[in-house]
Amino acid sequence: MNARTPVDLQTSLKMDEDSNQSSNPSFDAVLSARLSRRGLLRGSVGTVGTAMLGGVALTACGGGDDAVITPVTPTETLLGFDAVAKSLADVVVVPPGYSTSVLYALGDPLTATTPAYKNDGTDTDFENRAGDHHDGMEWFGLDTAGKPSLTSTDRGLLAMNHEATTDETRSSFFLHADGGTTTLPRPASEVDKETAIHGISVVEVKSTSGKWATVPASAFNFRLTSLSENIQLTGPARGNSLMVTKYSNDGTKTRGTLNNCGTGKTPWGTFLTGEENWAGYFTRSATDDTTRGGATAKSVVALKRYGRNAGSGSRHGWESAGTADKYARWDISQGTGAATDDYRNEINTFGYIVEIDAYDKTKTARKRTALGRFAHESAAFGKLVVGQPLAVYMGDDSRGEYIYKFVSTKTWVAADANPTDRITTGDTYLDAGKLYAAKFNSDGTGDWIELSISNTLIANFATYDFADQADVLVNARLAADAVGATKMDRPEWCSTNVANGEIYFTLTNNSNRAVNSATMPPDSANPRVYADIKNGTSTQNGNPNGHVLRVKEGTVGNAATGFSWDVYVFGAESSAAPGTVNLSSLTDDQDFSSPDGLVFSPATGIMWIQTDDGAYTDVSNCMMVAALPGTVGDGAKKTLTYAATAGTLTVDTYVGKAPGADNLKRFLVGPKACEITGLCETPDGKAMFINVQHPGETTAQADIADATKYTSQWPSNAGYGAGKRPRSATIVITKNDGGRIGS
Ligand code: FEO
Ligand code: CA
Ligand code: CA
Ligand code: CA
């Protein structure tokens, strides 16, 4: 979710990002990770992959994906590029020797017959166009015959999230000619566009003579929107009474996927998308608590824990557009009849990791309830070892929420790397297993605590009476409260270091972290509280700049219940106090704020950190930095001392070795008022795809008719497409000498 939402929206989002009122001690911090499927592919199919990649490296010199065809020097230096300076310009900046081009922007056609995007607010048919707010993204290679390929470098599918839309008060204003309606009821014609620009898209891309482009006529292309039919609910909560709705009387399916943020790619070749701030799209009446049985009724406790208080207005007012089911479902007020008569439970069908076969649009998507329900970001796989269970690491992005790990019951079978049926292979790994929440201890160790109905802390939890394991998974936040998981500074993406299997997590920021807070004081894994000044005037408190934490699993690997951890790097301004804020000694070429996207490249091993920032944007637009990190424990213990109401508060933390000029460098800065997010590459590492989300999101809706007042005109100012309205877009980055990105 963007960090610079207008005021009215912030009211609604705040509940999503700030609904952990539990009294867990936060002295220990939690952390969970994702082990990248890239690490998996490297490990388990390494022999095949290496051989094939070698072949590709040769053919790529004569292939189409490089602007200039020059052999890669074998002595390339990773992070050999010149660091990019911070920038407030309305352009994408990359180092000398690199090029970017816009590939796929909001509204671009996904069929041969869909008209070109006019970008004036009159376009329709978004079910056949790119959605809005491009976010996480994964590459799915295709060979010349159109079959899945692990090695193709000039043809593939991009599967990506369309998280949200730019709004000020309800209306997605760039999508409507006059900015749209901010009062209720919302017109159906506007709502129908807005529901369609959410979800995911899959689009074929191809490089011809060095020029990448989408293939609008490709039969592979498809969209899933917030209204797509027949999305299956799988795993322990399938068919549970919590899932029963008017749409699915047996609680086995729902419509659509929503607020899709981070992504993942499974070892069997499917796409994973995380549903993040879905709660704010629903409304319930002011009297709904009473209807449901009062403040202590189970469903009321659960709804509040997930940020939906009675009387909460919805983000867009979609429920107001008519009586048809596609509008009514967004009002989750309980009626007078049975659960099969209304949508009281509809919100329970959102908040999952959703598995989709990007190669085959006829396969039904699955919401994997075994992985828990929360504000999901990415899903990263741990090391892939034949005969061992899989681990999937995940974060819950709200202030004070937790890090999670899912461990599969089924152990890895090598043949599943190339299955006949990908999505049913997913059923065998992702529908049964154990879900854990992370607790970070002040001595640099941590514990994975299983969220099981047989855990007495959960079974006897005073706040909420769990009925069964399905209830534990659907209300994972409450279960993690019960076991005392560590409240984190907004866990965003996680990714696994392909070099050593350690799992990295971005903790983007936390304005609620406070020295005298009863529930969220600084702790070892979230140790900083300080004041940062923006624009010379406004003060930002808590942990405004965020940090990147990493975890090393215990000796048993994926199934470990204990780990060690430290903080790889603390975001900070280079001029900030080194002893309390700029703990990683970041320089002017390195400093960043609010890390969000995080991806290790399987080709180079480089870790790419992307920002979604609102704290340092008086100095620079959002950016992407490249890192070559070390290992957990390569730094030192550091004790921070705070003056507190109750006396002195000291916090021990563990700071990774300061990165140094050669190991951390700014690579890219985006246009104005955007977030940089999502990253994937061709397998040779020579073409990188990233997303520029919501350029110009700070534009006032009242200025819709005056393009000179838009806070960004990207990508039209980069020569892409019609109209001046800013558009979220995928760009492709190549190196002019044909080398790998980041060298
Ligand atoms: Fe969609 Fe938490 O970023
Ligand atoms: Ca974000
Ligand atoms: Ca500042
Ligand atoms: Ca994110």
Image (spheres, rainbow, N blue to C red):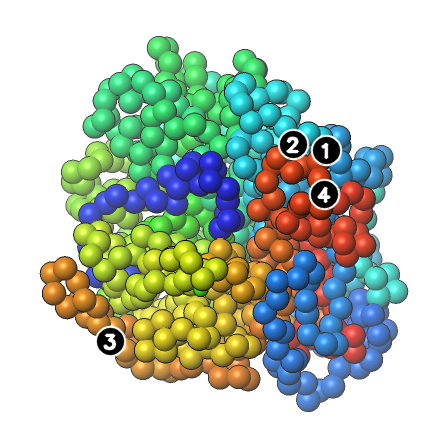
* SS state under label 4: helix
Q: Which mark is residue 366?
A: none
* Residue type beneath disc 4: Ala
Q: Nearer the viewer, mark 2 or mark 4?
A: 4
Q: Which mark is residue 179?
A: 2
Q: Earlier in the sequence, mark 1 or mark 4?
A: 1
Residue position for label 1: 121
Residue 655, quarter of the rendered image: bottom left
Quadrant, the C terminus: bottom right
Q: Residue at x 39, y 35 (%)?
A: 237
Measure how far apart labels 2 and 4 are at the Cα level.
12 Å
In the image, residue 419 sits, relative to residue 474, either above or below, namely below
User: Mark 1: few, some, or many residues within 10 Å (few <14, many ≥20)?
Assistant: some
Residue position for label 3: 639
* Residue type beneath disc 2: Gly
Q: Residue at x 81, y 35 (%)?
A: 114
* Residue type beneath disc 3: Thr
| Residues marked 2 and 3 touching at CB (< 8 Å) | no
Q: Is residue 459 left or right of residue 726?
A: left
Measure how far apart labels 3 and 1 are at the Cα level.
54 Å
Q: Earlier in the sequence, mark 2 or mark 3?
A: 2
Q: Nearer the viewer, mark 3 or mark 1?
A: 1
How far across and down, in percent of the image, does residue 353 sit? 48, 45
Q: Nearer the viewer, mark 2 or mark 1?
A: 2
Q: Earlier in the sequence, mark 2 or mark 4?
A: 2
Measure how far apart labels 1 and 4 are at the Cα level.
13 Å
Kindly tell me whether residue 633 is visible in this rendering: no
Residue position for label 4: 707
How far across and down, in percent of the image, does residue 449 sit? 27, 55
Q: Is residue 500 left or right of residue 144?
A: left
User: Mark 2: few, some, or many residues within 10 Å (few <14, many ≥20)?
Assistant: many
